[in-house]
Image (cartoon, grey):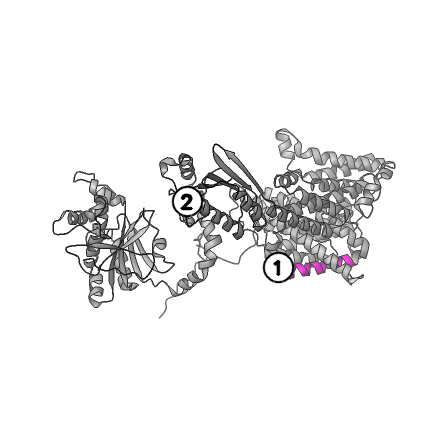
């Protein structure tokens, strides 16, 4: 029998737990920040859309269609939630040229095909590839488009008609200046003044009124002034939507139409993707770090732009792209989701249907002046400074000139060609200078060292006298194999003749063994040199820059760690990813439990030539193995032993000590009256090693036939033997040893000599002598008990 409790509908709590099911059907909620942001963007987009349509020579309604579609379609399906799409000033020149060549209906069809191409590119996941274009090329393209727009709109501002190309517009300026339309010029001048002065209004009142977009204020002010003054200027004339032109079948040469599709696809895609990346940076710079706003999915954004272009072209609208000005306004207004972008598109639709009588009052010179200012602002001083600082002015100027004089596609192609030429020039241009300073020979290499520079490098190196002190200063970020071998071979020969070689970076900081020559006695392990935590070549007292390096290391340990992780991801991860993926699938199956000290100088993978999955490693202070039941609540070592022996079924256990162990030094220096600190409580597990060393029943351990150098080394060796005996006291270890399925090994690593020693006959309990045998660098390892 099942008892059912009647549902209570009147006592439902007002709040629910975070993971409880929803109380009813989901409701579409709009945040207040999105609502206010959408209004701010709408007020900017409305006049700009009309102005861009005017500048292209398209029907004015097409700008409103593109703005609405960009907000509703790209806003809904795009991958950048806060990016605002619509007709962009960067597309003005392209669209105007296509309209002049093929007419408006064919231009709409080309827009549809370009959108289809964008969807295809998104399916191929090539969105990230667009970001590989040099910023100097992109900035040059935008500046060239801006200059072309400004020149064309200047003619409308002066009361004339723009020509078909930038050159014709420049040549026609003198005649246009001689025939100025005073009324149109006055309206345009008022628009420009308001646009430039509105963002600079001072004081608290200025801060309040600046929240109203300057573009809206400028166009509204010019409209009101023209109406009150009764100026005879051309005005907006929105035809009835019933006569709105829709796309037709493309008419014209196939290659020309294909070039138009390619141009619109390229410009809209690059502009939208770059704008999406810029929006991500703006969102991340918010005080809350952009919490709750996902980063842009570029392939999805490209697909969303493609869908918007297909819909816009099908409805008789201009090409659509992500627009930086409106996107910045959206982010600055506090938008938190794509609802703000979609709402702005909805407001455009309502304005196009309801506000037609108001829009018809706008003077065309005011819209022309607005677009002219936008075009001038596209030639950004900040971008010019950036490309100058990065020595890419040539690429910028060539791209800008090509776009203005020839065309967008041709200008971008010229920019890419020049960028490649500049890169090759930098790669091949290497300056090598030789000078003598304070009795030392300085070889300064500035630039990238490739095989092209090897003849000059070799000639300069062989001019250096044998036996001299040489400093090689490498001021570059790349060295190929040919240059590396040249420097390496010369270094080996120079050191063999009694000379010295020091290699430094551009700031004079020494590079730890960048060229490991066989004869270099001060060679270090290259994979660890970026940390600079160990000394290379010279003793610490002889290094004049020690204090500086140590201070820098202490100041930025996080940067060192991040740099090391970055190098792993870049260099090592691709090599081990398949192996780690296999281990992740199959689980770990190590052959050995390796118990060693926590000393930072012991790199277990280096001294054992092991890789992922080979060793189950336990590290603690002093490589101690507490006797069973003596860990006082800390069973970490015992747990590791049990897991390795019983679960992982390792074949062997190795206890590894090392020279200069701080734990053994602390044991020797400690006394019964020492304060019971955590370190002292842990080191009590090493007292049996002290007792063993002092006992007359045990001979001192020997290392490769010799006695230890001092008491610390003797205790380090004795401690390895003692911890092996502690291991035998563990029941799982004793059982596996009796079965013959487990072996024990003792190991000692001399840090200063980089030499490993194995305890001979470590499977036995040594009562009288314990001998560590040197591991030879060649031949099979044979650890035999010494007589």
Viewport quadrant of the N terminus: bottom left
Residue toward you, 494 or 35 = 494
Residue farthest to the left, as pictured: 696
Tell me the residue at 42%/60% (across/down): 580
Q: Main secondary structure of the magenta part?
A: helix
Q: Quadrant of the C terminus?
A: bottom left
What secondary structure is found at the residue carrying circle 1?
A: helix
* Helix, strand or loop under label 2: helix
Q: Position of residue 494 (x, y in %)?
A: 46, 44
Tell me if residue 362 can be seen.
Answer: no
Circle 2 packing at 10 Å, graded few (<14), some (14-19), many (20+), is few
Q: Nearer the viewer, residue 374 or 417?
A: 417
The image quarter in which residue 118 lies: bottom right
Q: How many marks?
A: 2
Q: Which mark is residue 531?
A: 2
- Look at discs 1 and 2 and give the one toward the viewer: 2
**Which residue appears at 50% of the width and 58% of the height?**
24
Which numbered circle lies on residue 533?
none
Q: Is residue 460 left or right of residue 555?
A: right
- Magenta segment: 106-122
Q: Position of residue 244 (x, y in %)?
A: 78, 56
**Alpha-carbon neighbours of circle 1 within 10 Å: few (<14), some, or many (≥20)?**
many
Give the camera-side residue of 442 and 408: 442
Q: Quadrant of residue 51?
A: top right
Quadrant position of residue 103 = bottom right
**Real-space Cα separation, disc 1 to disc 2, in angstroms:** 42 Å
The question of residue 251 being in magenta is answered with: no
Q: Earlier in the sequence, mark 1 or mark 2?
A: 1
In the visual, does 608 lie left or right of 301? Answer: left
Residue matched to label 1: 122
């Amino acid at each position: 029998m099942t008892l059912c409790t009647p549902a209570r509908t009147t006592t439902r709590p007002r709040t629910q737990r975070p993971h409880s099911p929803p109380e009813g059907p989901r409701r579409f909620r709009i945040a207040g920040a999105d609502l206010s942001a959408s209004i701010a963007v709408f007020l900017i987009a409305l006049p700009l859309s009309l102005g861009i349509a005017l500048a292209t020579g398209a029907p004015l309604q097409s700008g409103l269609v593109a703005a609405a579609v960009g907000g509703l379609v790209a806003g809904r399906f795009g991958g950048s939630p806060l990016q605002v799409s619509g007709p962009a000033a960067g597309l003005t020149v392209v669209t105007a040229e296509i309209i002049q060549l093929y007419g408006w209906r064919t231009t709409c069809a080309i827009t549809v095909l370009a959108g289809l191409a964008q969807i295809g590119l998104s399916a191929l996941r090539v969105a990230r590839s667009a970001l590989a274009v040099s910023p100097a090329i992109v900035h040059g393209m935008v500046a060239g488009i801006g200059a072309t727009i400004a020149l064309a709109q200047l003619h409308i501002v002066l009361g004339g008609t723009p020509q078909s190309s930038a050159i014709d517009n420049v040549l026609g300026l003198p005649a246009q200046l001689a025939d100025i339309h005073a009324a149109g010029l006055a309206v345009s001048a008022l628009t420009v003044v308001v646009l430039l002065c509105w963002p600079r209004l001072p004081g608290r009142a200025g801060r309040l009124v600046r929240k109203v977009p300057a573009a809206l204020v400028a166009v509204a002010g010019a409209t009101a002034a023209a109406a009150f003054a009764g100026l005879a200027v051309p005005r907006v004339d929105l035809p009835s939507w019933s006569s709105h032109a829709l796309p037709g079948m493309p008419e014209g040469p196939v290659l020309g139409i294909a070039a138009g599709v390619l141009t619109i696809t390229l410009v809209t895609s690059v502009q939208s993707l770059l704008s999406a990346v810029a929006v991500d940076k703006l969102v991340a710079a918010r005080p809350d770090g952009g919490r709750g706003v996902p980063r842009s999915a570029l392939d999805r954004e490209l697909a969303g732009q493609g869908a918007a272009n297909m819909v816009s072209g099908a409805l008789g609208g201009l090409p659509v792209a992500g627009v930086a000005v409106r996107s910045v306004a959206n982010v600055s207004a506090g938008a938190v989701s794509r609802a703000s972008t979609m709402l702005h598109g909805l407001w455009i639709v309502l304005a196009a249907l309801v506000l037609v009588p108001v829009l018809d009052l706008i003077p065309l010179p005011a819209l022309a002046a607005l677009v002219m200012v936008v075009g001038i602002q596209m030639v950004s001083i900040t971008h010019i400074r950036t490309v100058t600082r990065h020595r890419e002015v040539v690429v910028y100027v060539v791209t800008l000139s090509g776009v203005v004089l020839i065309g967008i596609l041709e200008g971008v192609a010229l920019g890419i060609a020049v960028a490649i030429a500049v890169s090759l020039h930098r790669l091949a241009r290497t300056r090598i200078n030789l000078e003598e300073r304070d009795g030392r020979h300085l070889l300064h290499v500035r630039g990238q060292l490739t095989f092209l520079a090897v003849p000059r490098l070799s000639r300069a190196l062989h001019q250096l006298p044998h036996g001299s002190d040489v400093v090689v200063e490498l001021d570059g970020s790349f060295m190929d194999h040919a240059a590396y071998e040249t420097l390496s071979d010369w270094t080996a020969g120079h050191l063999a003749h009694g000379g010295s070689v020091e290699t430094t970076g551009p700031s004079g900081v020494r590079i730890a063994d960048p060229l490991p020559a066989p004869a270099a006695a001060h060679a270090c392990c290259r994979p660890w040199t970026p940390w600079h935590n160990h000394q290379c070549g010279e003793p610490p007292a002889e290094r004049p820059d020690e204090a500086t390096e140590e201070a820098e290391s202490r100041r930025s340990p996080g940067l060192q760690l991040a740099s090391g992780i970055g190098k792993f991801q870049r260099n090592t991860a691709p090599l081990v990813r398949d192996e780690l993926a296999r281990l992740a699938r199959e689980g770990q199956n190590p052959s050995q439990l390796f118990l060693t000290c926590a000393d930072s100088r012991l790199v277990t993978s280096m001294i054992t030539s092991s890789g992922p999955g080979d060793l189950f490693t336990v590290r603690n202070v002093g490589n101690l193995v507490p006797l069973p039941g003596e860990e006082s609540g800390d069973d970490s070592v015992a747990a590791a032993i049990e897991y390795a022996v019983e679960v992982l079924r390792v074949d062997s256990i190795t206890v590894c000590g090392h020279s200069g162990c701080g734990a053994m030094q602390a044991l020797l220096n400690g006394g019964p009256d020492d304060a019971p600190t955590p370190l002292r409580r842990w080191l009590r597990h090493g007292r049996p090693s002290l007792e063993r060393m002092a006992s007359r029943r045990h001979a001192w351990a020997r290392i490769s036939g010799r006695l230890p150098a001092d008491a610390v080394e003797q205790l380090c060796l004795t401690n390895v033997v003692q911890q092996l005996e502690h291991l035998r006291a563990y029941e799982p270890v004793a059982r596996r040893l009796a079965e013959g399925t487990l072996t024990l090994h003792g190991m000692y690593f001399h840090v200063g000599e980089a030499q490993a020693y194995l305890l001979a006959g470590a499977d036995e309990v040594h009562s009288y002598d314990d001998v560590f045998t040197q591991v030879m660098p060649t031949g099979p390892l044979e650890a035999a008990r010494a007589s």
